[in-house]
């Protein structure tokens, strides 16, 4: 599937992938960092997180990592973003940037279409 | 499930793991361990941030239910979980909520019988819970209508008989000047006063308070003002009164111009300065006050002997007052208690009462009790009984709510077969799984809300109905501030939502199990109907019903045993009326009054004997310390005993039909000039003089060695305070030698005591017009008060057991009807192949039979646990063993048979041709 098929991403999904862009994480770390990144605006309950992860795993945007970065954390499962996942995030970022630019122009009184 | 070598789970984690069953199996297998890990992290983070665990669990449960429902529904409908759909939340926007509520409402209106049954069941359960909560709230949680009650304490004297006796006025003065940990301290004293106007005179409860009383209480005035510190200092201008709100409404019709008017209280004109805020009735729930008067004005009222400051004996230790205080900011109750004890110890040392009283010799023993005013407000002397009552009440109503939720869940699941088609259509038309789950939950919530509102109304009605009912400690329900205020409303809303989730979540999840396709199919295609869930619900229901039934039967049996107890005296033929002696006159005048009344009673037709006494059996009496022999001899433990000593006139034993086993009864030779004599009961004689005769022996009042009694008679034991009394020591003294301070009772023996009551009252009123007669009664009726715990339990549990039986019967009937409807074709085929009616009935009843047996097993376990509660509640009562359980089991089995027999019989009348023919 081309990356565009996954767009637009739901805010929760977007934040999960955003966190994973900076490295492998286990479930709770994803929840916490998503919350930090959004100044607490995004709160993903555990059940929702794993449903999102199930979907992302199924779609191949995320894989389970075999590596255990920390010896203490042996029993936890870590998740890693795939190349496809990165491409999806990239497309999404572009889409959002376009929209953001259009909005800024419109706010300044210029038609976004005349550009 | 992959195992990562997880460390042992804590209890919370185990609970969470159990709750994970709400998720679909596939999801659980895949992510169960991760979810537990995450839960552990979240719990740790919550603890670090100082979040209260109950809030943490609330949030966790909310998320769990939301997410599990979404996961279930999306698995069932085969829909992609959460990708690009808006509104992925069970808590929708207002617009959607309105639309969906409208849809749910329409669906409910289409099935009015179903909706009404559920709403009514819930209303009943929510109603009793709301009523129970409002009582608990008004008695224990927020008993006092005062500001910042957590900083207000009550102080008591530790006496030999109770840690909750009143302190003396001199002690109050000392605390006032010396206790640094107190911001304000006040003393007060209560009595009843006659309030007179042109037409009527009636007694009301008045409290005489010191300057700081209202500043401590912090109650504002509804109109006018309350008393302030100035009102007590000026002896010329202290003739004023503050009315309670209800007194103002009931006696003065809420007259808005009452401030400044005069009312006649105990023959003194007092100026009304204001009305206290609504709901404020003083510091004790058992004695709601009608008015408050400056303590310095008390002497001006005609109350007879004053025991209050200002009198000649102002500094006397016998001036008893209640004390409340507001703690200084930052002071703890322990610090206050320590300081007050120290102050009082020092004071007693100074006036050398410590040695005479014999209390607090050791510095470690407290001589002053300090407790929060809230705890002193209700049944301070017998709080554990009160708490046991309330606990039983709460357990029973809680169980009822559980039962109602189970029943409703059962009904919902039974209905979900019809719903399957409806939900299937909605899903096919594009409703997302979340929307379906939300729809089901909204429906449940609407039913619960309907039940909740009706429940509030039911609670209000019940509180009215039980207004005259009294809790232990003499707290009359009607006097409580148990109006349905915001706290009660919130509570009701809370249990409404919880019950909606409790009965709504399971059917929503269970209902969402099927795929869209399956929803369209007829239910009959599945070879074996899934009955497990319903049978389990049924079993739990039967178990609970059995528990309540057993409890009810136990109480009824103890009540029956109590009523059948031989009391040891003749209670059926004795009428009694009480007075509160006034102390205006001399002791001789009082004695003359008592003799006069007794004599007049004896002259009445039909009266065999009459007496005056300070004690009628089956009421409370205080134990006093006595010791065998004269005081001089060395005291050994076996010689000291505490037992009540009551005063009676000579005819007392004859009136009550109590047999003198040896010696003599009192007679006119026992006067205040002759030797002090006593009659003891058999237990006392056995305890102190097991071998020799007790007659002629001496015992002494431990507190005062001059008070020495010679035993002149031994009387048979009776029941004194409870029907379980056995081996209780007891003694009687002649009234001519002992002047009762508290109530005096006149008792008369006659064939028909009930018809004597009005005459009895008249005679007393006639002989002593200045006294008010209290409680005319047949002595036998006092047993009702004594057996109150049994009666309370029997009534309460019987009502709820009946409710449980009805609910179970409905549940069983519904389940069997459902089975029959569902297996019609199968049963038809069986009958066509020659199955007998009996075998059809057996087939149908098998499920219910299994559920009933499981229920009885669950019920026996619960009933055994309940015995624990009952033992605590019915202290000293021998429980009747297994009989109630057996009775309950038989009764419940019979009901189960009866409830299932109708649909089972219907099954035998299925016409095979009708069901086999293709439709």
Image (cartoon, rainbow, N blue to C red):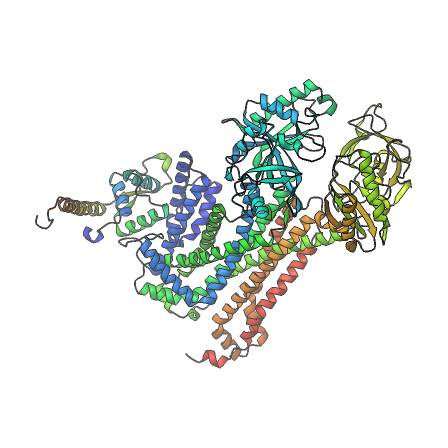
In this orientation, which residue lies closer to the viewer: B875 or B103?
A: B103
The residue shown at (91%, 40%) is: B664
Front in this rendered view, residue B141 or B674 = B674
Looking at the image, is A19 positioned above or below residue A59? above
Q: Position of residue B792 (x, y in %)?
A: 65, 51
Q: Residue at x 61, y 27 (%)?
A: B235
x and y percent of residue B293 in the render?
Answer: 60, 35
Q: Is residue B837 left or right of residue B656?
A: left
- Viewer-closest of B708 and B856: B708
Tell me which corner region of the image, top left, top right, bottom left or bottom right, holds residue B431.
Answer: bottom left
Answer with left or right where residue B412 lies relative to residue B623.
left
Q: Count the marks: how many?
A: 0
For residue A63, side relative to residue B871 (left or right): left
In the rendered image, the quadrant that contains the C terminus of chain B is bottom left
Q: Residue at x 70, y 48 (%)?
A: B785
Relative image position of residue A29 (x, y in whole percent): 33, 39
**In-front residue for pair B522/B754:** B754
Indicate the position of residue B820 as horizontal and vertical percent values: 51, 71
Instruction: Give the residue at the far left of this rendering.
Output: A114
Q: Is residue B767 above or below residue B552?
A: above
Q: Single out the residue that lies furthest toward the front.
A: B198
| Quarter of the view holding residue B104 | bottom left
Q: Is residue B275 above or below residue B118?
A: above
- Residue B658 in view in this figure: no
């Amino acid at each position: 599937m081309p990356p565009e098929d996954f767009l637009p991403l739901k805010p929760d999904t977007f934040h999960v992938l955003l966190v994973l862009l900076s490295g492998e994480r286990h479930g709770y770390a994803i929840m916490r960092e998503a919350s930090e990144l959004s100044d607490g605006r995004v709160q993903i309950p555990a059940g929702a997180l794993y449903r999102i992860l199930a979907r992302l795993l199924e779609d191949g945007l995320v894989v389970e990592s075999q590596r255990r970065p920390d010896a203490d954390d042996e029993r936890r499962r870590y998740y890693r973003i795939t190349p496809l996942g990165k491409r999806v995030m990239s497309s999404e970022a572009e889409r959002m940037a376009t929209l953001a630019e259009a909005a800024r122009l419109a706010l300044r009184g210029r038609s976004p279409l005349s550009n | 499930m992959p195992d990562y070598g997880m460390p042992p789970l804590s209890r919370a984690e185990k609970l969470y793991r159990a709750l994970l069953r709400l998720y679909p199996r596939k999801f659980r297998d895949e992510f169960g361990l991760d979810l537990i890990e995450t839960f552990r992290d979240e719990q740790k983070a919550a603890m670090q941030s100082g979040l209260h665990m109950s809030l943490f669990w609330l949030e966790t449960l909310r998320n769990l239910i939301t997410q599990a429902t979404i996961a279930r529904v999306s698995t069932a409908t085969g829909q992609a979980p959460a990708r690009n759909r808006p509104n992925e939340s069970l808590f929708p926007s207002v617009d959607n909520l309105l639309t969906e509520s409208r849809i749910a409402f329409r669906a409910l209106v289409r099935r009015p019988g179903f909706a009404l049954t559920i709403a009514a069941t819930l209303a009943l359960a929510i109603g009793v819970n709301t009523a129970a909560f409002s009582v608990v709230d008004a008695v224990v949680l927020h008993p006092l209508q005062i500001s910042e009650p957590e900083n207000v304490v009550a102080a008591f004297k530790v006496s030999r008989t109770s840690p909750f006796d009143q302190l003396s006025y001199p002690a109050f003065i000392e605390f006032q000047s010396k206790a640094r940990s107190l911001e304000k301290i006040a003393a007060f004293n209560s009595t009843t006063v006659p309030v007179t106007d042109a037409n009527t005179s009636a007694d009301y409860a008045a409290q005489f308070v010191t300057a700081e009383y209202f500043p401590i209480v912090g109650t504002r005035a509804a109109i006018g003002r309350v008393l302030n510190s100035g009102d007590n200092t000026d002896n010329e201008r202290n003739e004023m009164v503050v009315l309670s709100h209800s007194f103002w409404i009931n006696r003065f019709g809420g007259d808005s111009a009452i401030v400044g008017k005069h009312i006649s209280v105990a023959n003194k004109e007092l100026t009304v300065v204001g009305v206290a805020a609504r709901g404020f009735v003083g510091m004790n729930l058992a004695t709601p006050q009608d008015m408050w008067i400056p303590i310095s004005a008390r002497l001006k009222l005609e109350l007879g002997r004053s025991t209050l400051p200002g009198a000649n004996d102002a500094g006397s230790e016998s001036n008893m007052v209640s004390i409340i205080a507001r703690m200084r900011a930052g002071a703890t109750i322990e610090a206050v208690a320590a300081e007050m004890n120290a102050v009082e110890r020092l004071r007693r040392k100074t006036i050398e009462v410590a040695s005479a009283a014999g209390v607090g010799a050791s510095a470690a023993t407290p001589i002053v009790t300090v407790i929060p005013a809230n705890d002193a407000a209700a049944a301070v002397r017998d709080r554990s009984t009160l708490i046991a009552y309330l606990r039983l009440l709460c357990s029973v109503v809680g169980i009822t709510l559980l039962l109602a939720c189970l029943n409703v869940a059962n009904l919902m699941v039974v209905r979900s077969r019809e719903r399957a088609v409806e939900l299937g259509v909605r899903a096919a038309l594009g409703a997302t799984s979340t929307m379906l789950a939300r729809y089901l939950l909204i429906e449940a919530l609407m039913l619960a809300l309907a039940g909740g509102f009706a429940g509030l109304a039911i609670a209000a009605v019940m509180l009215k109905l039980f207004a005259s009912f009294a809790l232990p400690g003499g707290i009359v329900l009607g006097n409580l501030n148990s109006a349905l205020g915001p706290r009660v409303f919130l509570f009701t809303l809370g249990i409404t939502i919880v019950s909606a989730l409790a009965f709504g979540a399971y059917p929503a999840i269970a209902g969402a199990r099927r795929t869209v396709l399956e929803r369209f199919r007829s239910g009959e295609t599945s070879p074996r109907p899934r009955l497990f869930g319903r049978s389990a619900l049924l079993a739990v229901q039967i178990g609970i019903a059995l528990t309540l039934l057993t409890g009810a039967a136990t109480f009824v049996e103890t009540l029956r045993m109590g009523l059948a107890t031989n009391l040891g005296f003749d209670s059926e033929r004795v009428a009694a009326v009480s007075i509160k002696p006034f102390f205006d006159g001399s002791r001789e005048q009082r004695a003359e009054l008592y003799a006069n009344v007794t004599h007049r009673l004896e002259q009445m037709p039909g009266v065999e004997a009459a007496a005056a006494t300070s004690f009628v059996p089956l009421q409370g009496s205080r134990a006093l310390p006595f010791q065998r022999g004269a005081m001089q001899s060395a005291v050994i433990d076996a010689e000291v005993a505490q037992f009540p000593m009551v005063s009676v006139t000579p005819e007392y034993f004859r009136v009550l039909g109590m047999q003198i086993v040896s010696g003599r009864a009192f007679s006119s030779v026992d006067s205040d000039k002759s030797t002090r004599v006593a009659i003891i009961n058999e237990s006392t004689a056995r305890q102190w003089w097991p071998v020799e005769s007790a007659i002629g022996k001496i015992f002494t009042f431990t507190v005062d060695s001059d008070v020495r009694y010679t035993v002149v008679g031994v009387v048979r034991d009776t029941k004194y305070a409870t029907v379980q009394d056995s081996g209780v020591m007891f003694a009687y003294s002649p009234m001519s030698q002992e002047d009762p301070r508290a109530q005096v009772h006149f008792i008369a023996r006659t064939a028909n005591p009930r018809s004597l009551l009005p005459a009895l009252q008249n005679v007393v009123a006639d002989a002593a017009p200045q006294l008010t007669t209290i409680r005319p009664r047949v002595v036998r009726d006092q047993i009702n008060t004594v057996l109150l715990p049994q009666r309370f339990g029997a009534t309460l549990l019987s009502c709820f057991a009946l409710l449980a039986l009805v609910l179970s019967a409905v549940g069983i009937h519904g389940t069997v009807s459902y089975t029959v409807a569902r297996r019609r074709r199968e049963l038809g085929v069986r009958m066509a192949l020659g199955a007998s009616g009996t075998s059809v009935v057996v087939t149908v009843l098998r499920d219910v039979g299994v559920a009933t047996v499981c229920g009885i097993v669950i019920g026996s376990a619960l009933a055994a646990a309940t015995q624990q509660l009952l033992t605590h509640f019915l202290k000293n009562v021998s429980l009747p063993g297994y009989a109630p359980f057996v009775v309950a089991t038989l009764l419940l089995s019979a009901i189960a048979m009866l409830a299932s027999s109708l649909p089972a019989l219907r099954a035998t009348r299925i016409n095979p041709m009708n069901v086999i023919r293709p439709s």
